[in-house]
Amino acid sequence: MERGYRVEGPVARADEALALVEREPPHAGVLDIHLGDGNSVPVAEALLRRQRPFVFVSGHANPAATLPDHLHAYPMLPKPVDPERLHATLRGFAR
């Protein structure tokens, strides 16, 4: 546990992430856009249905290009992720 967060995962595939969300929905999600079996869009949508906040992370130059329009408004952090920026984003979800 770091900074009071409990980390579930990491997982490399969307189906694994969806199983985690189904089993015990997290308070918030940190989603790499590109996963081993595609992308994290289904995971983001599962979190939205449960009204759980999330932030995308990506090492790609234009990661939003692979997201549907309705997900462009959600926070996105570049990789490598700055821990302070991630902490500030997660802290913002608690407000």
Image: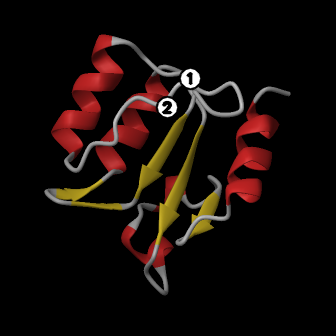
Residue type indicated by callout 2: Leu
Q: Which residue shows up at 38% across the image and 12% down it? A: 24
Q: Which mark is residue 48?
A: 2
Residue at far right of view = 95
Q: CA distance from mark 1 to mark 2?
A: 5 Å
Q: Badge 2, how many Cα within 10 Å: few under 14, some, many 20+?
A: few
Does 72 appear above or below 74?
A: below
Q: Which mark is residue 51?
A: 1
Quadrant assignment, res 82:
bottom right
Whether label 1 touches label 2, CB < 8 Å: yes
Q: Badge 1, how many Cα within 10 Å: few under 14, some, many 20+?
A: few
Does 53 appear above or below 32?
A: above
Does 35 appear above or below 49?
A: below
Residue at far front of view = 1
Badge 1 marks a residue whose secondary structure is: loop
On the rendered structure, is 94 left or right of 18?
right
Badge 2 marks a residue whose secondary structure is: helix
Q: Which residue shows up at 56% across the image and 23% down it? A: 51
